[in-house]
Amino acid sequence: MTTGPQALTGNFQVTAPAPPPTPSISYLSPGSALPGQTLTIYIRRLFYAVVPGTTELKGFATGITVNTFQVLGPTSAIANITIPAMRRPRRAI
């Protein structure tokens, strides 16, 4: 390839960058809770940023209520959640 007085000779290869890693949570504290419990959890994410202004937290099991969610910084947040109480199984008559 030639552009004016400059010339590029030889072989070269253009490589596209690899896709980013799959987003994941790197730290969640506490790591467990009991049915019927309301607690605040601390979240750190890995491989992607928490977007300021985000008000929704996805990925919890069905029935878990997110009461509040607050972004603390580009890679961290806190959430207050409620885990539903377990229902007692019905007894067959």
Image (spheres, rainbow, N blue to C red):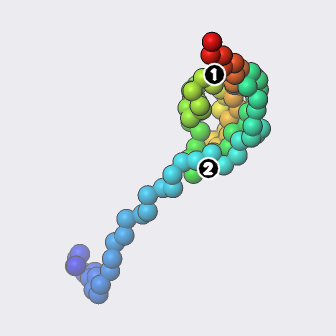
**Closer to the observer: label 1 or label 2?**
1
**Is there any visible trace of residue 67 in the rendered image?**
no
Counting from the top left corner in percent of width and height, residue 38 is at 75, 22
- Residue 81's image quarter? top right
Quick one: 28 or 12, which is closer to the camera? 28
> In whole angstroms, how far apart are the C-alphas of marks 1 and 2?
23 Å
Residue 54 x %, y %: 57, 29
**In the image, what residue occupies the spot 54% across and 48% down?**
23
Identified at 44% across, 58% down, the residue is: 19
Q: Residue under circle 2? A: 46
Query: Picture quarter containing residue 84?
Result: top right
The image shows residue 52 at horizontal and vertical percentages of: 59, 33
Q: Position of residue 76 (x, y in %)?
A: 68, 40
Residue at horizontal 32 percent and vertical 80 percent from the top: 12
Could you classify mark 1 by the number of other residues whose Cα lies within 10 Å: few (under 14), some (14-19), or many (20 or more)?
A: some
| Any part of residue 26 in sight | yes
Q: Is residue 70 above or below residue 5?
A: above
Work out whether mark 1 precedes mark 2 in sequence or the reverse, and give the earlier one. 2
Q: Secondary structure at mark 2?
A: strand
Per the rendering, the mark at residue 55 is none
* Left/right of residue 45 with respect to residue 19 in the rendered view: right
| Quadrant in which the C terminus is drawn | top right
Amino acid type, callout 2: Leu
Q: Determine whether the residue tagged by mark 1 lies in a helix, strand or loop.
A: strand
> Residue at the location (59% across, 39% down)?
50
- Residue with the mark numbered 1: 65
Q: Tell me which amino acid carries mark 1.
A: Thr
As drawn, 73 above or below 5: above
Q: Of residues 50 and 24, which is closer to you in this image?
A: 24
The image quarter containing residue 29 is: top right
Q: How would you rate the neighbour count of disc 2 (Cα within 10 Å): few for under 14, some for 14-19, many for 20 or more?
A: some
